[in-house]
Amino acid sequence: MKYSLLIVLMLLSFFTIQAQDTRSSIANPYEKQNDIKLNVLRAVSGAFEISYDRNLNKKSSLGGSVFVPFNQDPSKDIDVNYFITSYYRWYFGKKYASGFFIEGFGTLSSIDGKQLTNTNGDFIQDEGSDSIDFAPGIGFGSKWVTKSAFVFEGNIGLGRLLFNAKETDHDSVYRLGLSIGYRF
C-alpha cells in the first residue's frame, strides 16, 4: 500500500512539473520586450522619426528616438537639423507596458542659428552657425498594443534648452507624435 501511494504521488508530481513547464512556455503577445515605431505625424510634415522602446517590466520602459528632416524646402518652417532623444516611461495601464504614461526625457538637438532682431521697427534675420544643445523635459501620452503585436501611440512633451538657447530663436524643444509600430 505504501509503495502504491508513493508511485501515485511521484506520477502526480511529474504531471504537475510538466504542466508548469508547458504553461510557462506559452508567450503572452503583450509581454514582448521590444517596440519599434515610426512617427506618422512627423513623416507627413517632412521629417523622419523612428523610436525604439525596451520594455523593462509591466510598468516601465526605456527608449530612444532619432529625428531627421528630409524635406529641406525653405517654405517649410523646420529649424531643427536633427535630434536624438532618450526617455524613461511609467505606465498606468492594466496591460503590459501600455496605456497612459508619463515620461522624463533628454534631447540632444542641432538647431539652425537663425535669429530675428528688431532694429528700429524692422526685423532682420541674422544667419548664425547651427547650435547644438541639450534639453531635459517631461511628457505624457498613451500606447495601445493589439493581440497581433501592432503598437499605436500618441504623445506630447516639452523640454527647455540648457546651454545655447541665446544663439537661436528657440529656447525649448517639443515632442509630438502619432506613431505606429510593432512589438517583438
Image: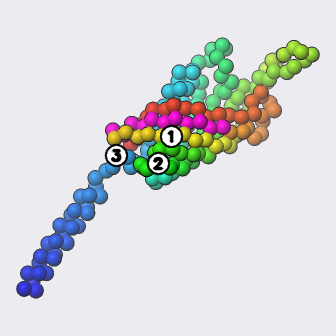
> Which disc, if any, is residue 142?
1
Magenta stretch: includes residue 153: yes
- Residue furthest toward the right? 120
Q: Residue 159 appears in which quarter of the rendering?
A: top right
Distance between the alpha carbons at the discs numbered 3 and 2: 16 Å
Regarding residue 180, the answer to whether it shows in the image is yes
Q: Name which residue type carries label 2.
A: Gly
* Label 1 close to label 2 by CB (< 8 Å): yes
Q: Name which residue type carries label 1.
A: Ser
Secondary structure type for disc 2: loop
Residues drawn in magenta: 148-158
Magenta stretch: includes residue 142: no
Q: Is residue 109 left or right of residue 124?
A: left
Task: Reply above or below: 34 against 38.
Answer: below
Residue matched to label 2: 93
On the rendered image, what quadrant is the C terminus found in?
Answer: top left
Magenta stretch: dominant SS?
A: strand
The residue sitting at 43% across, 50% down in the picture is 94
Residue 171 placed where, x, y %?
A: 75, 33
Secondary structure type for disc 1: strand
Residue 181 placed where, x, y %?
A: 43, 34
Check disc 2: other Cα within 10 Å, few if <14, some if 14-19, many if 20+. some
Q: Name which residue type carries label 3.
A: Pro
Mark 1 and mark 3 lie on one chain; the one further toward the N terminus is 3
